[in-house]
Every structure is written in structure tokens, then in C-alpha cells.
Amino acid sequence: MHRPWLTIWLAAPLAFACDPGAPADAPLDADPVDAPVADADPRDAGPPDAAPWPPQPAVQTCAPAPIDGDQLPDLVASPAVDTPTVAGWVALHQPSISGLYWGAEATGRVLRVEVTPAGASLTLVTDLAGALGATRVLDVALAHDFGADGTLYSLTTRAGRVQITAHTIQPGTTWIAHADDRVLVDQPYTGATPGGGLAVSAAGVFAALPAGPGIPAGVWRVDGATPEALPGDWTAPAGCAPDAALGGLWCLDHTADGDALVRVVDDAATALITWPTTAECHRRIGPLYRGGELPALWGALLTLDPCAHTVHASRVTADGRVLDAPVWQADPDVTGFGVGWAARPLALGATGALRLREADPDHALGWPERLSDTGCFTSLPDLAPGPDLVPYGLNAPLWTDGAEKRRFWALPPGAALGVAADGRLTFPVGSVILKDFAFAGPSGTTRVETRVMSRRPFGWSFHTYRWDADGQDATLLPGDTATYRELMVPDGDGTPAPLTYLFPSRANCLTCHDPSGPSVLGPTLAQLRRPVRPGGPDQIDALVAAGLLVGPTDAPALVDPADVLAPLGERARAYLHGNCAHCHRPGGWTPPDLGMDLRHTTPLADAGVCGVRRRYTAFGIPGELRIDPGDPGNSNLLQRMLHRGFGQMPPVATERVDPRVRAVLVPWIEGLVCPDE
């Protein structure tokens, strides 16, 4: 049975702060739905009893075909933001997946847009016409770390001058105290209607500015003590897009010969291509796509021809050629571009924004239609791993309605895993991670899904194979749509009961596998610090000995939440870490002002939960405090984990409450005393 409330969570960006835990997760990893929590947790049996891992082969058999860098994908559009009362956006940015957008009209209003399943609502942040005397807003941009410092930059004109101002949105509010404004540029310009734009990246704040009396047109870095000119012989720069992967800027310059696309890197400015044009039809620059959701578009810059109403994509190939092609026939009212969460390109129109996506999202991703043809397994349906697959297990895996899971990875020949500062493993380009889902029942095991993550130059791509009804093979699903399968799976007392199983879309995967944060969630030193098998060598030590892991490995193990011999507090924190902390952490999915950090390494006093009032709506679920020590019934965090329906935690990919929530978290809260600050 399809769940309407689940569709809402999947189809629309969430505008409220919650604990998203979309599906994120080889050894057997069976969530214990059929049995109470026992001394021996059956969920992670570890690799088989043979030697931990055979020598890695000289050729990687479990790998996709390379993406064709000479292809530029056709794009299609779907509604993203509907704002009929806005008189045309000049810029629109979505800095996180929270459903909040920030943008501006040319006439001066800066607005925050909150998108919920019920529609979009607008909040006036400021009116630059009144606050600055601006006659026109050319652009607005958000600081690279906007979630931390709340800085918004505006590029405006006023009485023959062009001005760049840094504004600070006050913490916990949507308003700007203009007394704190910092003017970065204030200079005259020549000509009737100047162009220009802002570009913000980790490297700084940059602006394309018109010429003025004694001031040449140019591209400048403007966040230093004084503006710094970038290289290039500029005529009328119209805007720039930062390259998040390779650094530098791609800029559009309106010249006498046409519209020139110029790449600025270090001390050089190189013209890539020039499009013939007229004064009425100058191109408008969009984002340079470096996200992970549209692999065939990776590395391409979007521009708009406003007279032909076409969006073009331009990319430099590995051998230095410039590809350029029309990729979308735009609506006549499209005037420019915005950027959504995960670098999603937006087309701005008269009444809102459209989200651009690949028309054929799977045509260039390199994975075959059938799982048996991937080279990852030597035989199906027993999932006999191929020679380059390394099985692994976790101490505190994510709950997925009792699914049995098996996990593997494959590395390029001669490559090894690294270790990040926070203990997460880093995977080299070419790596593959697989996770298989199956359910045990009275008639045996039903294999349902095998998920694949591929480490590409642009990040990770996500793929789903759905197992056929006969359990002999699996078929690759389209990546742009979530689908469902109705199952009969034993419930907590062993009685077969209906279960709606979600096969996630690529966008669903990105909800938790955050492209701007840790994309790989399970494999960390703390999760992997466990025996390869009962009585066998430690998994981390075995990886190091096999040459598959390089780097510092000193890290305490995360306890198994089902281990009744471990301290109850450590079991509870391990459970919250494995099921919640991939989103509830600094820089995670949730809004920055939520102030909740459920990583097991964060002291409870600093986690923002014990004795802390909930910040947002409770969805009718009990609990005034996030965790009320001694009172599970008034602990909203717990009650949402015990709830199934709208407002549940995790919000997707689970219809049943994990027995460990009652077995571990309830008694932990009953005996909890909040630590001193």
C-alpha cells in the first residue's frame, strides 16, 4: 500500500527541522525484528570464516563503464518554487535541504522562501531600495559558510554608482540589522544600465563590475581590505561562476565580437568560446555544475540565450576541447538562474523557479541493466563475491525494518582507503560500495534490493537494483524516481504482516549521503573496530595488514547497541550515532540553528538534547523536551522514534519501530540525569 504521507516527505524539500534518516547503509546484517534484543546480535556476522580477505586482483571487475565526457545531456524542468507574487527573481539560492531559499527581486526586496508540502510562503528580509537607496538589484549571493555566519552579499546600483554590501542576517531571525552592514565596493559606473554579478566560493567573494570614470571594467576579489583585480582584458563582464572542484572562475564578458566565455585560474584568463550576439540578446550566465545528482552534466556551465530561449551547456574535455550545445528549450519567461541544494541548477521565471534535471538520468552512468552483468558477484542469488569485493560489518548499523544486510566494497587495483580527521574512511576515485537488503520469513529469505555507490571524479553516484520476484537476478531501476514494493514480512511476534518497501531515487539518497558533507556514512574506524568474525582478528587490523587501509587507526570502538553486557549509556549513544548522527551533526542535513549533535564523540552536555526544549513543531507527537531525563513520555526525540506516520523518525525507509528503541533508549532515559554544562 502506498503511503501518502511518505510521498510528501520524499517529493518535497522539508521545511522543518527533524532527524532525517533516509536509507544509508558483506557480512550478514540482520535487523532483529523476529526476536527480542539478545546477548548475541545477529545483525553483523562479519566476513566468512576463511582468511579475512584474499589478495586483491590486478583488474577491478566490479566497476562501471567510464562516463562519456563528450556527452552533454538534454535537460527537462519541473516546478521547484512557486512564488506568483514575486516580480521576477534576479537570484535565488537554497543553501541546504531544509526547504528554505533566499533571493531578491530587481526592485529591491530580499526574500526568504519557505517551501512546504502546502506551498511556498514568503518572508521579507529587507528592502534594499529603502535601506540603501538602491535603484536596482543586480545580484545577491550567500556566504560560502552561510549556515554558520548568515552573511548575504548584495550588488546594487544607486545614483550612478555600483555598490557591494555585506549584510548579516541576525541569528535565529530573518531580518538584517543594516547598522552592521559592511560596504565592500562603492564606485561610479559609466553607461546607461550596468551589468555585473557576484560569485562566492571557499576562495573568496568575487564580483564582475562595470567600468567607471578612470576605473576599468573587470573581475575583482572584493572581500579583502581593498578590491583586488583578477587577470583578463575585460569589456563588460556580466557575471562569473565559481568552479567548486578545480578552483577559479568561469566568467561571461560582453565584447564587441560577441559573448566570450572566459576561464580565470590563478594568474591567467583564457577565452574558451565566443558566441555571436546582439546588444538585445546578450547571454546570461548560470552555475557551473559540480554536484553529484546529474553526472552527465558535471563540469558544465549553463548559459541562457534570452532571445532564442535556449539554455546551453559548455564544458572543457580532458583533452582541452570545448563542448557547447543547447540542452533545454526554456520557457519564454525564464530570465536567469538560481542554485538549489546539492548544486541543483534552477531556472528563474516570472513566477518562481524550475528545477533542471537530466532527461535521461541513467544513460551515461555505466552500470548494466542486470546485477549479474556487473562483475561484482561470481554467482547469484547467493551473492558470492567477486575477487575484488571486500565484505565488512558495522557495530551500530542503521535500522531498516528488520532487513538483513550484507555490505561490500571494491577498490581500484593498488589503491587503499584513507582516514579522515573525524575517523571516516576516504575512498579513492573508482571505488564501489554495495549493500544488499533481504528479509527473512517462514518460507526463507526474500532478497529485495542491492544498492551501489560509485566514487566518481565529481563525488558519489547512486544506483539501485531491484531483485526479480524469483530471486535469481536484479534489474537496475531509473535513478530519478522512487518506487515501492509490497512485502509480507514477519513483525515483532513473528506474524507475517504487510510492509511497503521503498526503493529510493537518487535524490532520496542525497538526503542523507550529503554531497556537501560525509557522503559515505557507515565505514568509520569506530564502526569497523570489531572482529572480522567471532574470535577472529580485528577488522581494522586486518585491513591494515592487507594493505587496504593506510592512516592513523587509533580510535575507540563504537559499542553494539544490542550488547547487554555494555554500559546502557554507551549503547544508547551508539544507537543514536548509527541512526541519527549522519544528519544531526554540525553541517548535517538539519538547519544550523537546530543545535543538535548526536555523534557519539560529542559529550551529552554538548549534544543539545538533554533537558532541551524542542525548537520546532511536534507534529502532534508528545514531548515538550527533546529528552526529558527520567520521563520517556515527555521526550520528543524518543516519541518520534516510537511513532510511525507523519513526523516519524527516521522520516523515510522505515514503517516499523526498531525493538532496540524500547529496549535501549527507554530505560536509558528513565535513568538519565543531565550532565552539568
Image (spheres, helix red, strand yellow):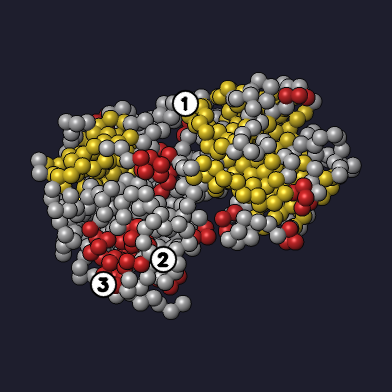
SS class of the residue under badge 2? loop
Q: Which disc is residue 567 wearing?
A: 3
The tag earlier along the polypeptide, 1 or 3, is 1
Amino acid under label 2?
A: Glu
- Return the residue found at the far left: 443
The tag earlier along the polypeptide, 2 or 1, is 1
Q: Is residue 523 above or below residue 93?
A: below
Q: Residues within 10 Å of mark 3 (few under 14, many from 20)?
A: few
Q: Is residue 644 left or right of residue 108?
A: left
SS class of the residue under badge 1? loop
Q: Is residue 244 left or right of residue 580?
A: right
Q: Nearer the viewer, residue 101 or 602?
A: 101
Q: Residues within 10 Å of mark 1 (few under 14, many from 20)?
A: some
Q: Quadrant of residue 171?
A: bottom right
Q: Is residue 354 above or below residue 515?
A: above
- Mark 2 — residue? 624
- Mark 1 — residue? 359
Q: Which disc is residue 194 wearing?
A: none
From mark 1 to mark 3, how far is it between C-alphas?
A: 52 Å
Q: For the N terminus, give its image quadrant.
A: top left
SS class of the residue under badge 3? loop
Q: Mark 2 and 1 residues: CB-CB less than 8 Å, in contact?
A: no
For the point 58% across and 61% down, the residue is 172
Q: Mark 1 and 3 residues: CB-CB less than 8 Å, in contact?
A: no
Amino acid under label 1?
A: Ala
